[in-house]
């Protein structure tokens, strides 16, 4: 396992982090709590020490499961990242809310669900255009002065929004979507973070399971599954993606790797990427991450990956559908 450092945190962290959206079950067809806890324990036993979660993942369930796992493995073995700034109602309708009042309530609820007294990395999940970014940044800065958080982060923020944040408070990390099929941050977000010393925690490295290679051409997703409204999983776009997956799998097999390992190694080799989040809800799903090869992809292999993507997906589809309503 490779390790690195993140601004604002003293402890070195694994370059693979465990993402827990799927553990919450919501929009992923459910999750078994016992299996989820076992997945977290397996990840930590395998050297993964960074666990990323959020209140909206299962409406508190993911944080509660992470909290139970922490109590079993020990707080000192885990770097905990969670988020704030989204709220929901009884119909599971989500909206952005980064008001100071909402954030003060959220952090107390997250600390309670996680069963800890301080969060290592606290991130604003999505920018809220109704609340000045400076106000949100100052609220998190007050949490740090109270000892409730250690590092300040954002997720899904543009360079202009990060600029506004940095006028009011330190910004240690950004968490954007990034994978072989979704590379939009290469244009602006990634260069901005490199130039300003901001750590990048990339989410979606397996592109909602597409880069696991487990899907078939006539795949049917259950009601409520997020992939039912993901344009990348619809019609011709899905077929083109599967063709790219087939080519990428052959490239991975030539190295003796799995396709998910190829996807993660590619992302980790991109300049400015601090770590990537690997979603898993069972021990089996995290095993490839634990066994990630140490050797890098060659320049020739990186060029071949680019050729495959240009040939199979000439017009990439971004992850914009993920954004909650303003």
Image: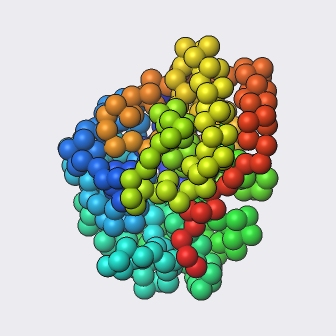
Query: Would you place residue 85 above or below residue 69 in this image?
Result: below
Q: Percent x, y for residue 214? A: 47, 33
User: Does 166 sit above or below residue 75?
Assistant: below
Q: Quadrant of residue 165?
A: bottom right
Note whether residue 173 is visible. Answer: no
Name the residue at 31% across, 34% down: 283
- Residue at figure coordinates x 67%, y 55% from the top left: 318
In the image, is residue 91 above or below residue 62?
below
Report the residue at 52% width, 66% height from top.
125
**Which residue occupies the foreground of this view, 113 or 21?**
21
State the image quarter where residue 154 is shown: bottom right
**Tally of numbered tags:** 0
Where's residue 30, x and y in %?
A: 31, 53
The location of residue 168, given as percent across then percent down, is: 64, 76
Q: Nearer the viewer, residue 200 or 90?
A: 90
Asked whether the viewer can see residue 87, the reply is yes
- Residue 217 location, x and y as percent? 54, 38
Q: In the displayed structure, would residue 101 be above or below residue 68? A: below
């Amino acid at each position: 396992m490779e390790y690195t450092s993140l601004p604002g945190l003293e402890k070195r962290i694994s370059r693979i982090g465990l993402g827990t959206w799927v553990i919450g079950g919501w929009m992923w067809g459910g999750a078994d709590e016992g299996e989820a806890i076992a997945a977290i324990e397996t990840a930590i036993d395998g050297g993964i020490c960074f666990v990323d979660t959020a209140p909206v993942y299962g409406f508190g369930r993911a944080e509660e499961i992470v909290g139970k796992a922490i109590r079993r493995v020990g707080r000192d073995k885990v770097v905990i990242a969670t988020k704030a700034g989204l709220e929901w109602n009884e119909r599971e309708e989500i909206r952005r809310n980064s008001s100071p009042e909402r954030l003060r309530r959220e952090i107390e609820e997250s600390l309670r669900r996680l069963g800890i007294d301080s969060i290592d990395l606290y991130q604003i999940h999505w920018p809220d255009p109704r609340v000045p970014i400076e106000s949100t940044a100052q609220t998190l800065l007050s949490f740090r002065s109270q000892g409730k958080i250690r590092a300040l982060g954002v997720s899904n923020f543009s360079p202009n929004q990060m600029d506004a944040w940095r006028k009011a408070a330190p910004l240690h990390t950004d968490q954007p979507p990034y994978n072989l099929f979704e590379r939009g941050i290469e244009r602006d977000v990634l260069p901005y973070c490199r130039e300003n010393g901001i750590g990048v925690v990339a989410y979606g490295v397996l592109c909602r399971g597409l880069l696991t290679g487990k899907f078939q051409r006539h795949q049917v997703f259950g009601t409520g599954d997020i992939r039912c409204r993901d344009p990348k999983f619809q019609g011709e776009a899905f077929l083109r993606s599967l063709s790219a997956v087939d080519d990428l799998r052959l490239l991975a097999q030539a190295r003796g790797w799995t396709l998910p390992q190829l996807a993660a190694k590619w992302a980790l080799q991109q300049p400015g990427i601090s770590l990537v989040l690997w979603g898993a809800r069972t021990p089996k799903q995290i095993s490839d991450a634990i066994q990630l090869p140490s050797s890098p992809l060659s320049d020739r292999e990186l060029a071949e990956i680019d050729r495959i993507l240009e040939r199979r997906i000439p017009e990439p589809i971004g992850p914009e559908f993920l954004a909650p309503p303003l």
